[in-house]
Amino acid sequence: MNCLSNKICTPEEAAELIQHQEVVGVSGFTLSGYPKLVPKALAKKAERLHQAGIPFAITLYSGASTGESCDGLLALANAVSERAPYQSNATLRKKINEGTIRYLDEHLGLMGVKIREGSLRAPTTVIIEASHISEDGKIYLSTSGGNSVAFLERAENVIIELNSRYGEKFIGLHDTFIPDLTPGASPIPLRFSSDRAGKDYIQIAPEKIKAVVLSDAYDEVKPFTQPDSIAIKIAEQILDFISYEIKKGKLHEGLAYQSGVGNVANAVLTAMANNPSQAPVSLFTEVIQEACLPLLKTDKLKVASGTALTLSPIAQDEFIQNIDSWKKHFVLRQQEVSNSAEVIRRVGVISMNTALECDIFGNVNSSHVCGTSMMNGIGGAADFARNARLGFFMTPSTAKDGAISSIVPLVSHVDHTEHDTMIFVTEQGLADLRGLSAEQKAKVIIQNCAHPDYREELLEILERGLKTAKGRHIPLDLSSAFKFHQRFLETGSMKS
Amino acid sequence: MNCLSNKICTPEEAAELIQHQEVVGVSGFTLSGYPKLVPKALAKKAERLHQAGIPFAITLYSGASTGESCDGLLALANAVSERAPYQSNATLRKKINEGTIRYLDEHLGLMGVKIREGSLRAPTTVIIEASHISEDGKIYLSTSGGNSVAFLERAENVIIELNSRYGEKFIGLHDTFIPDLTPGASPIPLRFSSDRAGKDYIQIAPEKIKAVVLSDAYDEVKPFTQPDSIAIKIAEQILDFISYEIKKGKLHEGLAYQSGVGNVANAVLTAMANNPSQAPVSLFTEVIQEACLPLLKTDKLKVASGTALTLSPIAQDEFIQNIDSWKKHFVLRQQEVSNSAEVIRRVGVISMNTALECDIFGNVNSSHVCGTSMMNGIGGAADFARNARLGFFMTPSTAKDGAISSIVPLVSHVDHTEHDTMIFVTEQGLADLRGLSAEQKAKVIIQNCAHPDYREELLEILERGLKTAKGRHIPLDLSSAFKFHQRFLETGSMKS
């Protein structure tokens, strides 16, 4: 480690390498595998400069959301001018919605492609959390794949946060393959969740490494909570429906599962783990969540393929303790591959993603409250929903103690069009939209998924659409389209 | 032809084989390669039964739109209860918008997959226009690929319209490969527009063929018209932009072109043909339109891969006369392959599709007038736009003599979300949306693409959004969202 050891420095020294207005790429995806020490030092540097009247802000690109030490502190220090492609931090979100941080809300599976193709700006500096590095420039990632390969390919300056928590034990966890973008390149050589196509490290020119910062920080993931009764009710319906479809011969057995982040996806995996007759499953997903550990421990997990391993600190410790026997069950990929249309379709995936709101005609909003306020972002939901064999969007039928209906006349922002959605599920029931016309969809969504408190008004709006719409193909009453949202903005409740 | 010749019958006799409430699949895509005689006879049968008070209506599934002899006459005879996945016929459209025909508006690239997977109902009878058939059940298609393989795989009864216009000369034009849907199947073995992966015929059990009807009908395609000045202006900007991106190193050379149906796409191909320094191009598209013939004749067409060869009768004759020397430049595929996400991305495609309206935040409506009236359908636009390397949506900035602005505050129906769109072009100018925030997109779309008559009001609406929206990430003024559409419905013009 002679050469690299000369590059070991403090987070503050590393932060000095980053200039105002730089595009900085960081490792990390959904609170896992992001740098924690250098961003913190960078936030302090920004505050110091701002106090001296000197401007300092960066464009921050990542895999997906990072934790408080990165997104939170940098946003708080006004050190971010532009952010992409996803976030979930309260401070950052506030500034995006105030209009002080520009935000590019990108499909997670295409962000790296756009960087490599040149349609988004390439990072000049990257900060990568690594589990291990070698003198000749081999970088072994930590708990996420993200866009690290794409960023490292383009950036000139590399800062490594070497996290001793993982070390050499993590070697072999990743598959860092990304597809060649030359027109007419070969197919992505992956057919099953367990397949590997590349190396377990990223090779870069060692002279690109400008600083190495030593770390032992945990990923700042909140403790796993048991699913509530609404989530359990939604999960049960999803699992029943899948069994029924397989029994009818309408669904292949052995499809892999993609479960979005959140309560309901956890409830599905938990229910599988608790079911003694559940056959072992494969996950081909984006975020491997803590709920997959009970599956693993009950011998029901064949393999979990994803781009992030998002575990609470207690589970991080458990994972590291058991890594020798557990490693063979996990593959961490670059998000261009975990979320690739080609691979998702070929592997064969049942997708389960959370909707913020659904409309009666089958469109889904997964990102914007009342059409204007960014929640987190579209994330990878569309990568999966568009290419899944069977796709669920799920949400409790109401939010804010019933003041918000998750089923609305028209979604205030479309992330997934009526062409891309198949099944809606709330705790009220399930609506299978496949093969239905717009009018049929509206009836079944209102009847099966809407909360009884909102059902009548939704039916009235549909009836008005059927009577007054210029065309009856989509019997939408334009004047009532955002009635629920406008009432909520005026009165604090969507209820009439 | 002993066995098959016994099955030769009149269109009327063939129509007798089709029962009330059957799901009938037909060959054909965008007015090419669809059956013409049996549907006409079926329409007459329906009229006769209706006069006798006997109900008769079928579910009609196809590749895409068919001509007057099929979609038109069947709709006029009230012989269709449900239609999928695309149409462009005035009579059929009227009934869809009256609510008397259920219409499933599906991504064209996924229709066959859904039939094969069982999430849409499978046809029991199919009517296929063929150029040639063999005693042992080899079917050689005519001018379109469509969903014929998927339909023939599932249906029990097959009616052939054997069109003598094409005959054995058409052998070799098609590649009938469709991917295996078993989870973990092999990649689709196609890398370039010219690659072939399957046979040039479809093999079925010969006993499935219940009737053979002899035909010499032309595809009912309107004569090719030279592009107007607005289309030429839009096309010039697209070609200039592509050259500029290649020069800047931001776009690979040698990408294939996908051109949607219509005036502007024709103008692009025509401009290429008229440009003496244009290098030969490949098309990887859905519909191979007549405008590719001038490219071919000026030695600028390497290969055109598509699922339909849509030529006017004069050009059909010309194509057949020259088929021996021209055939090597064409591949007709099943639409599951021509529109496959995997293949589009790998081949590397520049997509050009027509928008009905675009909004200032980057969403595109390609199907519904005022959010309710079906025009044609989403078609294959999303298959291509979502997976293209560079994607254009183009439209004249106004319609109906200026009474309609194609740039609106919010589209009344979303077919392509802001996440899936890259470049908007009108005759006013071009907006490159890549890497822009919602507010930045709005400014550039209004400034570059909107017609001057609407620019001021669009800016006012944006300003109001920036002042009043709950969140500024998407500065949408909900109360003005459909102002243009509502004014149009009330006054006949979007102008204030």
Image (tube, coloured by chain):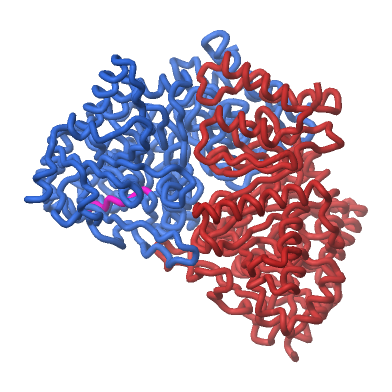
Chain colours: A blue, B red
Q: Residue furthest bottom?
A: B2
Q: Nearer the viewer, residue B219 or A469?
A: B219
- In the rendered structure, does residue A331 fall within the stretch colored magenta? yes
Tell me if residue B446 comes above or below residue B230 in the rendering: above
Q: Position of residue A437 (x, y in %)?
A: 67, 42
Q: Say left or right for B494 vs B371.
A: right
Q: Residue at x 57, y 42 (%)?
A: A433
Q: Nearer the viewer, residue A116 or A18?
A: A18
Q: Nearer the viewer, residue B401 or B427?
A: B427
Res. A195 in view? yes
- In the rendered structure, does residue A157 fall within the stretch colored magenta? no
Q: Residue at x 12, y 48 (%)?
A: A4
Q: Residue at x 15, y 48 (%)?
A: A132
Q: Residue furthest left?
A: A2
Tell me if residue B172 comes above or below residue B69 in the rendering: below
Find the magenta span and give its range: A329-335
Q: Quadrant of residue A47?
A: top left
Q: Position of residue B357 (x, y in %)?
A: 71, 38
Q: Quadrant of residue A12?
A: top left
Tell me if residue A477 comes above or below residue B283 in the rendering: above
Give the quadrant of the C terminus of chain A.
Answer: top right
Q: Residue at x 67, y 71 (%)?
A: B301
Q: Position of residue A325 (x, y in %)?
A: 13, 53
Q: Say left or right for B413 vs A61.
A: right
Q: Position of residue B474 (x, y in %)?
A: 54, 26
